[in-house]
Structures are given as structure tokens and as C-alpha cells.
Image (cartoon, rainbow, N blue to C red):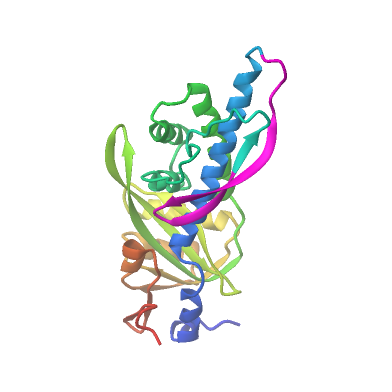
Amino acid sequence: MIDKEELLNNKEFYKSFKSGEDLTSFFKTMHKRAVEHMLEAELDAHLDNEKHEKTKDGNYRNGHGTKKIKSSFGESEIKVPRDREGSFEPALVPKKHNIIDGLENIIISFYAKGMSVSDIEEQIKEMYDFDISTSTISRITNAVASEVVAWQNRPLDDLYLIVWMDGIVFKVRENSKVINKTIYLAVGLNREGRKEVLGMWLGKNESSSFWMSVLTDLKARGVEDILITATDNLNGFTGTIRSIFPESQTQICVVHQIRNACKYVVCVNSHINTPSNSH
């Protein structure tokens, strides 16, 4: 049986929580997956349009090429779909271009529960700046929405040793204006010592009802117990956690690293340990 008090005071436990991929790596992976799905939908729309044109032979898919792209998350290698005739010109990542700048926050926000399909469609319109047809926008939206829903509803483990919750403010363009959106993340540490982002939720404000919906979502996806929950004293959270996970112990600490550098900080015995000052 796992002793919660022992975990709270076990530096090796927290060391394992801090090791491995950080949030930036997670965002990088999600960004790559979304871009690839959007490119696939672009090619589908391109081939569908060609069916209505008078051509000698039908065009079709012809595997994938690879391309390195750069974003604020670093460099990633993506798969770019190809057509037999070579007439496909990606709009999101044009040929001879490899920098996707200013779209990262929009793409990551797709994965947050609270974004409707129409919200995603509006964001995609902003991204493409109306350079593509309405039907292509709809096709891309459907591809992204399918990927997002599958990720949001994936099954989770029955037990997590610790779950960290905090909010990150993203600047995104909406209706030609840059606005702030807060996305709340739940990051869990499983029995094997692996971290994973359990989910992301778009929150207009922190309230007991909001956290009730988040925790109920985790439980519906298979989580039966959380030994320790750690937050930055999020409003309404500590009072709600026990109603869903009554055996969980809540640890309050300042989780400023997630906001500032996409790293994790750990609160042990009322002081902060970070990768830079822990030994």
C-alpha cells in the first residue's frame, strides 16, 4: 500500500516527477499532430476539387514526404502528404517555407475542452487568412475536431500518484483582435513515474462548478483515485476535490514555473524545489 505522507516527504518521488519531458515538449507534440492533420485535410480538399475539373487522368495520394518546421516550441519533423501529379501546394506550410510563427497558441487551444467546433472553425479561418475556400475550411475543421475529441476522451489510468493543476494564459487572435484565454491543465504522474497531460480545459473563471466538471471528466475517463493533488490555491478547487476524490490529499504551493517557463516546480515541506536548485 502506498503511504501518502511518505510520498509528500520523499525527495526521490518528486525527483521522478520532475524528470522526463516537460510541458514544452508536450505542446510541441500536440502542435505537430494538429499541423499534420490539417495538411492531410488540405490534400483531401485539393484532390476533391480536381475531381470536378476536366483532367485526363485522376490525381491521387502518393505517400508522404518529411519536412522540418520551426515554431516557438522548437524544431519538429512533420509528415507532408503528396499527390501523384505534384500539384498540391500546402497553404499552412508552403513549399520552401519552414517557419510556423504566431499560430502555436491557437493550435494548442484546439485541444482544450470548452472550444466548440464553430470556435475551432473561426480560429482556422483566422489562421488561413481566408486564402482557401469555405469547403476546405470545413474539411480542415472536421479533421482537427476528430483528432481533438479522440485526445480529449481517451481513457486514463485508474490511479495517479500526484496530479498538478494550474492555468496558463495564451494570447490568441480572435475577430482580428488579440485576446487572453486561460487554459487549465491537469498533469498526472502515474505508477511508472511517467508524466502525462490528462486534459486541458478552457475556463472563463475559476469556480467550484468549473472544477467539479473537470474532476468529473477525469473520473468518467477512468480515474478512481488521486493520492495527492497540487495547486496554486486555485479558487474553488480545494473544496471540490474531496467531493469527487475523497481520499486525495491537497498540497498548496506556488506553481509559477508552469506559467513562466513550462517547467515543473515541486512543493516539499513548504519550500520550492526546482531543477536548478535541487540536488
Among the 4 quarters of the image, the one containing residue 41: top right
Q: Residue 204 location in percent, x, y?
A: 33, 46
Q: Is residue 191 visible?
A: yes
Q: Residue 179 location in percent, x, y?
A: 28, 42
Q: Residue at x 44, y 51 (%)?
A: 70
Q: Which residue, as the protein is rendered here, is positioned at the far front?
A: 96
Q: Can residue 10 be seen in this view?
A: no
The region drawn magenta spans: 55-79
State yes or no: residue 62 in magenta: yes
On-image quarter of the C terminus: bottom left
Which sits in the foreground, 206 or 108?
108
Our reading of the magenta stretch's main secondary structure is strand
Tell me: 207 left or right of 108.
left
Which sits in the foreground, 257 or 243?
257
Q: Residue 94 location in percent, x, y?
A: 48, 37
Which sits in the foreground, 16 or 149?
16
Q: Which residue, as the protein is rendered here, is positioned at the far right?
A: 57
Which sits in the foreground, 115 or 249?
115
Q: Which residue is drawn at 42% across and 30% down?
A: 125
Q: Residue 182 location in percent, x, y?
A: 34, 51
User: On screen, 29 above or below 161?
Assistant: above
Among the 4 quarters of the image, the one containing residue 260: bottom left
Q: Which residue is drawn at 68% across and 25% down?
A: 59
